[in-house]
Image: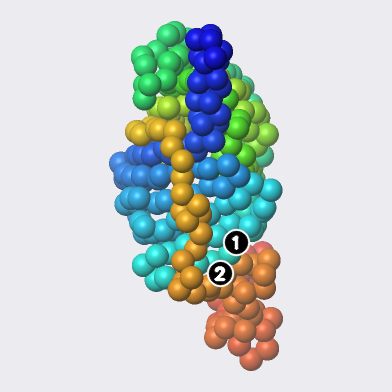
């Protein structure tokens, strides 16, 4: 065999092995809200072929479903998720469509408080330059400025929440081919990715940012301010309104991939140990949520178990004369 043919054979074999390798990455998330409260979590994602496993390595806030040490198993083409809790040697089944439905429900509840429309939406790319090499991948450094207003519904005066965001990202296209070859990565993105439920315009912004490449690090700074549409004369009538008019704050989130490697993930990483016991999850679609009408002190209308009724406000138009 000639040297040229041998080189082609070796390169082809290496490419084949690389295609069979899985992907393992560790992601850290830190968040500080507008009141200075902070949280941190660390997640490790392992993907091999059509299977994905997401391990919760660290979590600063208690969560009954996903505590540190728990993990989730997903398979491409299946909507079922398995939430495994090694500390209790138990696992639960959940349909990822239910989780996304919960996200949509949360979005609808949010919209009842902050409105369903956007106004004055602006998205501007402030910076696009070559970034540093991160985890062996070439990057581009991007900065976006995003601003919009969300009119508040059911208010006696014109009011809105004004939002200004800065998104700083370090993205790469060096992982495009690898991610595309692993259908398990798609299963993770669809099952555990950001929940839809917000307005379509904001979803389109997220899609646009994802199209820029795979983010190895992102910093999101969000400034919100209540805008009651008041003139300076309102302070004379009610000085408290001026305080409400400027109410708001700044939140900051940092998401970073801290470890990334191509490696073959053993099959037993995607299997549940045989001595683990399945337990039921409270799921409104499975009918296992408690019947609130049957609980002591149930809802008004439940015979014999009505909650004490609060006294009614008097009709001010029909108060007897003194």
- Left or right of 56, for residue 305: right
Mark 1 → mark 2, Cα distance in angstroms: 7 Å
93 in relation to 51, above or below: below
Residue 74 in the image: state x and y as whole percent: 57, 52
Residue 255 visible here: no
- Left or right of 73, for residue 236: left
Q: How crowded is mark 2: few (under 14 residues within 10 Å), some or many (20 or more)?
A: some
Name the residue at 59% across, 81% down.
Answer: 298
Residue 251 in the image: state x and y as whole percent: 39, 35
Q: In which quarter of the image is the C terminus?
A: bottom right
In-front residue for pair 1/250: 1
Residue matched to label 2: 281
Residue 47 in the image: state x and y as whole percent: 51, 42
Q: Quadrant of the N terminus?
A: top right
Residue matched to label 1: 94
Contact, mark 1 vs mark 2 (Cβ under 8 Å):
yes
Name the residue at 50% across, 10% down.
Answer: 3
């Amino acid at each position: 065999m000639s040297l040229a043919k041998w080189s082609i054979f070796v390169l082809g074999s290496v490419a084949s092995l690389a295609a069979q390798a899985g992907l393992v990455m560790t992601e850290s998330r830190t968040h500080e809200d507008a009141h200075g409260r902070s949280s941190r979590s660390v997640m490790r994602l392992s993907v091999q072929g059509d299977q994905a496993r997401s391990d919760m390595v660290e979590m600063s806030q208690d969560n009954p479903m996903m505590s540190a040490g728990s993990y989730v198993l997903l398979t491409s083409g299946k909507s079922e998720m398995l939430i495994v809790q090694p500390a209790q040697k138990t696992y639960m089944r959940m349909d990822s469509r239910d989780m996304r439905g919960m996200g949509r429900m949360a979005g609808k509840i949010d919209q009842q408080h902050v409105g369903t429309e956007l106004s004055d939406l602006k998205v501007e790319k402030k910076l696009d330059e070559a970034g540093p090499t991160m985890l062996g991948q070439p990057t581009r450094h991007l900065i976006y400025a995003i601003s919009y207003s969300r009119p508040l519904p059911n208010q006696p005066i014109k009011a809105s929440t004004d939002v200004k965001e800065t998104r700083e990202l370090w993205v790469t296209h060096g992982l495009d081919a690898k991610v595309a070859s692993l259908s398990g990565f798609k299963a993770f993105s669809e099952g555990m990715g950001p929940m839809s439920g917000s307005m379509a315009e904001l979803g389109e912004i997220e899609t646009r940012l994802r199209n820029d490449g795979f983010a190895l690090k992102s910093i999101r700074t969000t400034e919100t301010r209540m805008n009651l549409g008041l003139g300076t004369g309102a302070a004379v009538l009610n000085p408290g309104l001026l305080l409400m008019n400027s109410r708001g704050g700044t939140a900051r989130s940092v998401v970073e991939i801290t470890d990334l490697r191509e490696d073959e993930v053993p099959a037993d990483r995607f299997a549940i140990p045989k001595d683990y016991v399945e337990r039921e999850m409270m799921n409104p679609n499975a009918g296992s949520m408690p019947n609130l009408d049957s609980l002591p002190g149930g809802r008004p209308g439940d015979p014999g178990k009505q909650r004490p009724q609060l006294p009614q406000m008097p009709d001010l138009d029909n108060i007897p004369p003194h």
